[in-house]
Amino acid sequence: MSQIALPLKAGHGSPRHIAIGNDNRAVLEALQVAQTWPFRTAVLSGPPRSGKSLIGALFADTDPGDGGGEAIDDADLLDETELFHRWNRAQESGTALLLVRSSGEGDWAIRLPDLASRIGAALPLSIGTPDDEQLASLIGIHSQQRALALGPDAAEYLVPRTERSHLAVERLVETIDRLSLERKVAPTLGIWREALEVLHGPAEPRLL
C-alpha cells in the first residue's frame, strides 16, 4: 500500500500520512490535473475521518505549478456570500479551488442561486469505503502515530472483525492503545479481542 507523507505546518507535530488505496486513489489522481477541472473547481466529500482535510492540506501545500491550488476546509459551513467571493477570486487569478465538505452525506443545499450554479458545475470527488488492504494500512498508520506495536499479525486478526470504515479503524487502534496502557501489558491477542468487544460487542467475524 502506497503512502504520501503530508508536511503539515508547524504545531501539528510529526508529519501525517495518507494511505493510497481503493477508496481515495481516484481523488488523488484528480488533484494532479486540477487545471482541467470545470472552472478549475472540485468538491471533495467523504465519510468522517477519511482524510478529507489532510488531502486538502496536501493540495494547498503543493505549488500551483505542480498541480496545487487553494483548499477551503469545511466549505459547506462557510458563509455562502464569502464562499462566492472566494470562488470569484480564484477564477480571476486562475487558481484551482478544492472545496472540502464537512460531511459526505446528502446533497449540498446551497441557498444562494449564483453560488449553487457554480458549485453544481464543479467536479465532484468522493472518498469511498476502504477495502481490507486499505484497512490494514490504516491500522498501521494509526498505530505508528501512537508508537503502538501492531504488526501484520494484528491487522490480519483485526481487519475481518471490525467495521469497514476509517472512523472505526481509528477508534479501534485508540481503544487497543488505551487498554494496553490501562492493563500495563503489550497489545497482543487478548487486548485486540477486548478492544473489539468494547467497540462492537461479541460478534462473528465479517466474512464479506
Image: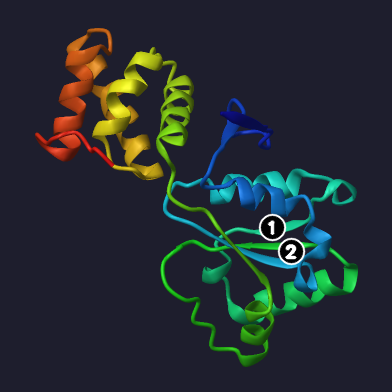
Residue 112: x and y, percent? 60, 89
- Badge 1 amino acid: Ala
- Badge 2 amino acid: Leu
**Can residue 150 be seen by looking at this rendering?**
no
The residue wearing badge 1 is 71
**Marker count (numbered):** 2
The answer to whether residue 195 is left or right of residue 100 is left
Question: In terms of secondary structure, where does tag 2 sit?
Answer: strand
Q: Residues within 10 Å of mark 1 (few under 14, many from 20)?
A: many
Question: In terms of secondary structure, where does tag 1 sit?
Answer: strand
**Can residue 42 be seen by looking at this rendering?**
yes
The residue wearing badge 2 is 97
Residue 79: x and y, percent? 58, 76
Residue 197: x and y, percent? 14, 32
Question: Is the Cβ of the residue at disc 1 closer than 8 Å to that at disc 2?
Answer: yes
Task: Tell me which residue sits at (29%, 26%) in the image.
Answer: 158
Residue 147: x and y, percent? 44, 16
Task: Tell me which residue sits at (62%, 28%) in the image.
Answer: 15
- Residue nearest the viewer, comparing 40 with 148: 40
Task: Tell me which residue sits at (78%, 58%) in the image.
Answer: 34
Relative height, residue 27 to residue 79 (above, below): above
